[in-house]
Image (cartoon, rainbow, N blue to C red):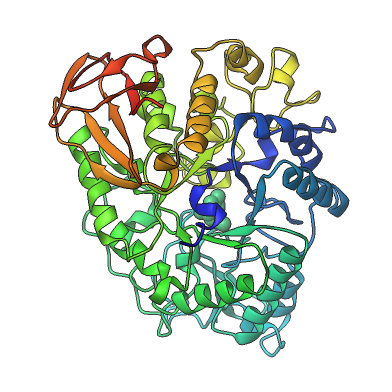
Amino acid sequence: MREPPWWQKAVIYEIYPRSFQDSDGDGVGDLAGILRRVDYLSWLGVDAVWICPIYPSPMADFGYDVADYVGIDPLFGTMADFDRLVAALHARGIRLILDFVPNHSSDQHPWFQEARASRDNPRRDWYVWRDPAPDGGPPNNWVSQAGGSAWAFDKASGQYYYHAFLAAQPDLNWRNPDVRAAMYDALRFWLARGVDGFRVDVLWHMIKDARFRDDPLDPNYVEGQPDFRRVQARYSADQPEVLEIAQEMRRVLADYPGDRLLIGEIYLPVERLVAYYGPDLGAVHLPFNFNLMWAPWQPAAIMRFIENYEAVLPPGGWPSWVLGNHDQKRIASRVGPAQARVAMVLLLTLRGTPTLYYGDELGLENVSIPAGRERDPFGIRQPGTGQGRDPVRTPMPWDGTGNCGFTTGEPWLPLGDGHAGRSVEAQKRDPDSMLALTRALLELRRREPALSIGDWAPLAVEGDVLAYARTWGERRVAIALNLESVPKTVIFGEPLAGRIELSTDSKRIRRRISDRLELAGDEGVIIAPEP
Ligand code: GLC
């Protein structure tokens, strides 16, 4: 049997570079800062890091507006810093995944500057231009994810250009073969520098309906919800031709040794999501599965969700699990600090590749941002809709010094109250901390192949808990999670010879289990056969 590719066993750690570690006192994290923390990543035990965009950018969307696909923004450092970081990660066996933002560039990208210069500029067709509607308004009803119409009028040339996000992020025209060729060259540039894979930003947006039909209105839209909820994105996203692009990207990666990884950011229900694995699994290796983030925090609902996802996966399609990222509410704020520990056990014991958001290993919650200090344009443009992402992007607390060791300057976003007490340094000293739990889980995953590459099956139990087993060869590992704060008695349908190998409550570790288990409130355990 072929050894599974590295990324099937891997745990990916997402770094929001502005907020991880500053090295030069400007209040914004940078590559030299990440370099300083490589030993931490190695100590924690993650297998790969995904770094959000570090390319030259006017930072209208903090790097998701790229002005040069093959450079490093001076705010983050230099190409030499980048090369040093790759080497340092690789020296510790950690892979590096870059964020690739192909759907749109910055409006300051030279390509767009040329495209907007005139209607007959050779680069015009690199972006999506349309004539105004007969009344002079936007060509159709497509809505920007950042609020308002997705069309911006360019006075000089008398046409509108399309932007699925901010007007400063014009969409590239991926129907144009020259755009594809240029972007694949950018991939090659980074692959040759040793990058192990890419997380492709908003992959499902990359092709739009050729006839630009109006999106149907969403009858469930309620006033006060963000604008993009007004329509169902039937024509503006998730077009079948996107798959072709993913397949082409896969072929680019396949020219390089070492199982380079293609991840797709795709916000779709699992039934649609799985199409992105492609025929013969030839498209995206890991379409990000975000849907667990919206499942009600309740055993039956989560079990139904996992079983359904497992059932719709194509044969051989490898699952992906995510409980948080730089766009979504922190898990500890969604389910509460005690359940965040249980959620960590869940994330790291499901079948598939988990992606862990920086700071979640500390149990960080959303930080409330004082009025006037908001930075995220999505939030500033849509006040009161909960679209602001600053609260989940605050600096990592490292220790008890000023600004928790994040910066010697003024941090670009405030640290949370009490974050010194939750810092890496503080939690390292506490064997019951969230950090200690996360590290123990990662260590157990490495030791116990059942947890990384084993099969998954629900466990028949009495008691309202989430219970499942992971099996690898002869070894069967059971997981039982209490999703509530009241104690639960669990009676297993078949006896389990084993002991508690890990618990959210460290006092319970090593206890023997046969057919009955008393779970404390907010407790999650992993039961394994005696070694
Ligand atoms: C993705 C990113 C998000 C960004 C958007 C536009 O959803 O995760 O942060 O704002 O794409 O690039």
Which residue is rendered at x = 61% and y = 62% of the image?
260
> In the image, is residue 336 above or below residue 205?
above
Which residue is rendered at x = 51% and y = 83% of the image?
131
> In the image, is residue 430 above or below residue 450?
above
Residue 471 lies in what quarter of the image? top left
Q: Where is residue 82? Give x, y as percent.
A: 80, 50
Quarter of the image with the C terminus is top left
Res 456 visible: yes
Q: Where is residue 109? Give x, y as percent.
A: 73, 67
Q: Could you say which is closer to the camera, residue 297 or residue 154?
A: 297
Q: Where is residue 201? Give x, y as percent.
A: 55, 59
Which residue is rendered at x = 32% and y = 65% of the image?
272
Q: Could you say which is closer to the camera, residue 169 or residue 265?
A: 265
Q: Could you say which is closer to the camera, residue 301 or residue 241?
A: 301
In this rendering, position of residue 421 left or right of residue 206: right
Res 364 visible: no
In this rendering, position of residue 281 left or right of residue 390: left
In this rendering, position of residue 477 left or right of residue 19: left
Q: Where is residue 69? Give x, y as percent.
A: 73, 65
Which residue is rendered at x = 21% and y = 21% of the image?
514
In this rendering, position of residue 403 left or right of residue 74: left
Tally of marks: 0
